[in-house]
Image (cartoon, rainbow, N blue to C red):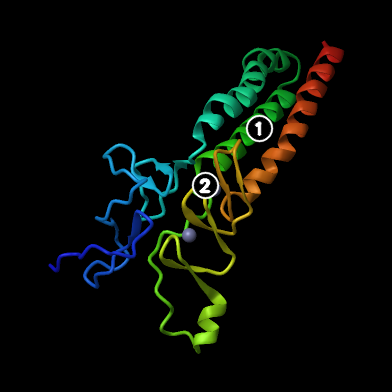
C-alpha cells in the first residue's frame, strides 16, 4: 500500500484519491490551510462547514460561511409564520376540507424543502483535483473546457467561478447570497429560484386558504 504524499497544490479539503489502488475513493488532503480547520465533527471545505457525511466525496450537506445570517435571521423569518400556519391553521382547515388541508401540507413542505436545499446543500463546489484531461483532442480544446484557478490551485470545468467569500470554486456560479449563507451555484439555483417565487406564492396561498375555509365554515 503506497503512502499518499501531501499535495502542495491541494486547496480544496476533499480531493480525489490519486492512487490507482483506490480510484475514486475520497480522502482529506493532509495539508492544513490557514483558514481551514479539520475536526472530527465538522470538516471544512473552503469556508464551508460540512456535515461529516461525505457520501463518496460529494459532501452533500453543508452550511456556508454566512450561516449565522441564515440560521438566526432567514430561518426564523420563514419558519415562524409557516410553522404557526401548519400548527394552528391546518388542523382547523382539515375539519372543513381535507383536500385543502392536504394541499396546504404539500405546499408548506415543498417550500421548506426549497429553503433546505438552497441553504444546506452543496452549491456545486469543485472538489476534485482535476488535471487536464489527457484524452482531450488538443490543448486548445482542453483550455476551452477547463480553467485553472490560481487561488484554489486546481483545474475546474467550464461555467465555474471562484467565490472569494467562500474560498472555493463553484460550478454554475450565479452569485454569493448572504441570506442563503453561501453561494448560489449549479446545484442550488433551481431551489433558490423556487424559494424566491415560493415566498410570494406561499404568502398568498395561506391567506386564500384561510379565506376559503372561513367562507365554508
Ligand atoms: Zn477557485
Ligand atoms: Zn460564496
Residue 179, position in %: x, y?
61, 35
Q: Mark 1 and mark 2: span between their CA atoms?
A: 35 Å
Left or right relative to 127: residue 3: left
Which residue corresponds to the image point at 51% horizontal and 81% vertical from the top-left?
142
Which residue corresponds to the image point at 68% horizontal and 32% vertical from the top-left?
107
Quarter of the C terminus within the rendering = top right
Q: Nearer the viewer, residue 177 or 165?
A: 165
Residue at image mark 2? 165
Vertical order, 105 against 48 (above or below): above
Residue at image mark 1? 106
Q: Nearer the viewer, residue 10 or 136?
A: 10
Mark 1 residue crowding within 10 angstroms, few (<14) / some (14–19) / many (20+): few
* Residue 134 placement: quadrant: bottom left
Give the label, 1 or 2, closer to the camera.
Answer: 2
Left or right relative to 40: residue 206: right
Residue 202, position in %: x, y?
74, 30
Extreme residue toward the left, this view: 1
Q: Is disc 2 placed on a helix, strand or loop?
A: loop
Q: Is the CB atom of the residue marked by disc 2 within 8 angstroms of ligand 2's nearest atom?
A: yes
Amino acid at each position: 500500500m503506497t503512502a499518499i504524499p501531501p499535495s502542495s497544490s491541494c486547496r480544496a479539503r476533499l480531493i480525489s484519491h490519486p492512487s490507482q489502488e483506490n480510484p475514486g475513493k475520497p480522502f482529506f488532503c493532509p495539508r492544513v490551510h490557514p483558514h481551514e480547520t479539520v475536526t472530527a465533527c465538522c470538516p471544512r471545505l473552503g469556508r464551508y462547514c460540512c456535515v461529516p457525511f461525505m457520501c463518496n466525496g460529494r459532501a452533500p450537506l453543508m452550511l456556508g460561511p454566512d450561516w449565522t445570517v441564515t440560521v438566526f435571521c432567514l430561518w426564523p423569518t420563514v419558519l415562524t409564520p409557516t410553522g404557526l400556519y401548519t400548527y394552528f391553521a391546518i388542523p382547523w382547515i382539515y375539519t372543513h376540507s381535507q383536500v385543502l388541508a392536504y394541499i396546504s401540507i404539500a405546499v408548506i413542505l415543498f417550500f421548506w424543502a426549497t429553503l433546505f436545499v438552497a441553504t444546506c446543500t452543496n452549491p456545486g463546489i469543485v472538489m476534485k483535483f482535476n488535471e487536464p484531461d489527457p484524452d482531450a483532442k488538443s490543448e486548445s480544446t482542453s483550455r476551452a473546457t477547463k480553467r485553472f484557478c490560481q487561488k484554489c490551485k486546481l483545474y475546474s470545468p467550464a461555467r465555474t467561478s471562484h467565490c472569494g467569500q467562500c474560498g472555493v470554486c463553484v460550478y454554475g456560479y450565479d452569485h454569493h447570497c448572504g441570506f442563503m449563507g453561501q453561494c448560489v451555484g449549479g446545484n442550488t439555483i433551481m431551489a433558490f429560484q423556487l424559494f424566491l417565487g415560493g415566498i410570494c406564492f406561499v404568502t398568498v396561498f395561506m391567506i386564500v386558504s384561510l379565506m376559503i375555509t372561513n367562507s365554508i365554515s
